Amino acid sequence: MVVIPWNIAIPTKKTTIVFAVKDNQSRVNIKVYQGERSKATDNYLLRSFTVSGIPLAPMGVSLIEVCFEIDDNDILIVTAKIVSTGKTVKLTVTNYGGRLSKQEVDKMMKDVEKFKLKDQQFKRKAKAYIGMDDCIYHLRKKIKSNDMPPKDLKNMQYALAETMQWLFKGRVAELEEIERRKKYLSFISRFPFQK
């Protein structure tokens, strides 16, 4: 996701919220990229840092507020704050050692236009996979609760196992297939009994 768009007037400050993506996740690695492509690896990695000491909680509960600030001297300051504890971690990126040249930035901006359709497809697929991961998470919680008739439990376990097997074979699939499997998991978790 682009937090600070290219060519914005400085100084500027933008904040976004990230969250733990696993149950009981005590640390999050935050990578700071320069570029406007949808896929992080198509951009230039400036730096990364780790936020640790996150209180153990279910997935999605622990929030981290990440603030990106560019000052008058074109220095990027990234601050990550664990919302529940107030603990902060700070990263500073200066003009030296690792920032892109104007020519490299110009090429990247041309690539944004050149690969616009590909990036839009990537975003839709990524969103669908995230939705499916969410369905898998909730289905696992429901199975763990074991609060259903044995036949329903068996149907849920089968749906989960079949989906996990499909995922482990490789996450290369068309958007329609991902959406179809996500809808199936969502349906099974709500209405598990199939006659």
Image: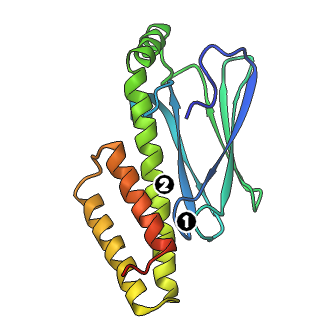
Regarding mark 1 in the picture, which secondary structure is present there? loop
Q: Is residue 176 above or below residue 23?
A: above
Looking at marks 1 and 2 on the same chain, the residue that comes earlier in the sequence is marked by 1
Q: Residues within 10 Å of mark 1 (few under 14, many from 20)?
A: some
Q: Is residue 130 above or below residue 147?
A: above
Amino acid bearing label 1: Gln
Q: Which residue is mark 2?
A: 131
Regarding residue 59, the answer to whether it shows in the image is: yes
Is 138 situated left or right of 81 in this image?
A: left
Looking at the rendered image, the quarter that the N terminus falls into is top right
Give the image location of residue 33, x and y in percent.
51, 32
Q: Are marks 1 and 2 in contact (CB under 8 Å)?
A: no
Give the image location of residue 65, x and y in percent.
70, 47
Is 86 situated left or right of 1 in this image?
A: right
Regarding residue 136, the answer to whether it shows in the image is: no
Q: Nearer the viewer, mark 1 or mark 2?
A: 2
Q: Which residue is the extreme one toward the left?
A: 169
Pick the residue in front: 186 or 12.
186
Q: Residue at x 26, y 61 (%)?
A: 166
Which label belongs to residue 25? 1
Pick the residue in front: 118 or 176.
176
